[in-house]
Image (cartoon, rainbow, N blue to C red):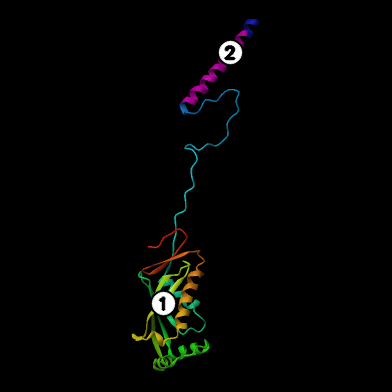
Amino acid sequence: MEKSKNNRVYLLISVFCIAICAVLVFCMLIDAPVPKIGEGADLTHRPPHGPTEPEEPANSRMAVTETYFSKMLSQYLPAGFPVSQIGVDIQKNGTIVLSAQSGQEELKNYLEQQGIDLNVKQRLLLGLLPESFELSAELDCTTAEDGGTLQTVPQKASYNDVEIDLDGLPSQFFTDIGAALNRLLVSTGYYFTGINITDGAIELLTEGEESY
């Protein structure tokens, strides 16, 4: 009886030893750490190569194209501004050329609505304008000191390819155009602190970006 009991004990010990050996062999095969008897399992997730730093987002620039300007600019001009079929040409040297259809009567009505008093030269020019004509204005554009707006200075104006003395047009006319350009840029909803003018577009820059 005692011999049979001893045999069962030896059998259990043998089975236990075989099980331990099997575990050790399995761990070696899968290159896993050997569990320590009597210790709880470590459930903490540990990255295989240590902690990683989040990637910094790449700088992005929003480009407002001359096509978009041509399509949207009229929405930001004052009501009744006497132009239609606006075209915009943006050049890398900072020149923006605006072209549009206008008319003598429309221009006269607009000036009256705005309460703009014309001098002798301006009244003479208005009387010489044809009933309808193509108006062109060339603006020299730079970034304002605050970095977030355009400064526009008129350089040339013409109707039907006939150059106009800039003094022949009220300064308010060009002021309204410059304000409309800036309102359009702000309307994008893109926060920017600088402006870069390229061929065909105006890029809006965020802080830390540099123009070129």
Looking at the rendered image, the quarter that the N terminus falls into is top right
Q: Which residues are magenta?
A: 6-28
Q: Residues within 10 Å of mark 2 (few under 14, many from 20)?
A: few
Q: Determine which residue is flagged by label 1.
A: 153
Helix, strand or loop status at disc 1: strand
Badge 2 or badge 1: first in the primary sequence: 2
Residue 11: x, y in percent?
58, 13
| Res 85 quadrant in image | bottom left
Q: What's the CA distance linking mark 2 and mark 1?
A: 101 Å
* Front label number (2 vs 1): 1
Picture quadrant where residue 159 is located = bottom left
User: From what the image shows, is residue 145 above or below residue 122?
Assistant: above
- Which residue lies under the disc numbered 2? 11
Magenta-colored segment: predominant secondary structure: helix
The image quarter containing residue 64 is: bottom left
Mark 1 crowd level (few <14, some 14–19, many ≥20, 10 Å Cα): some
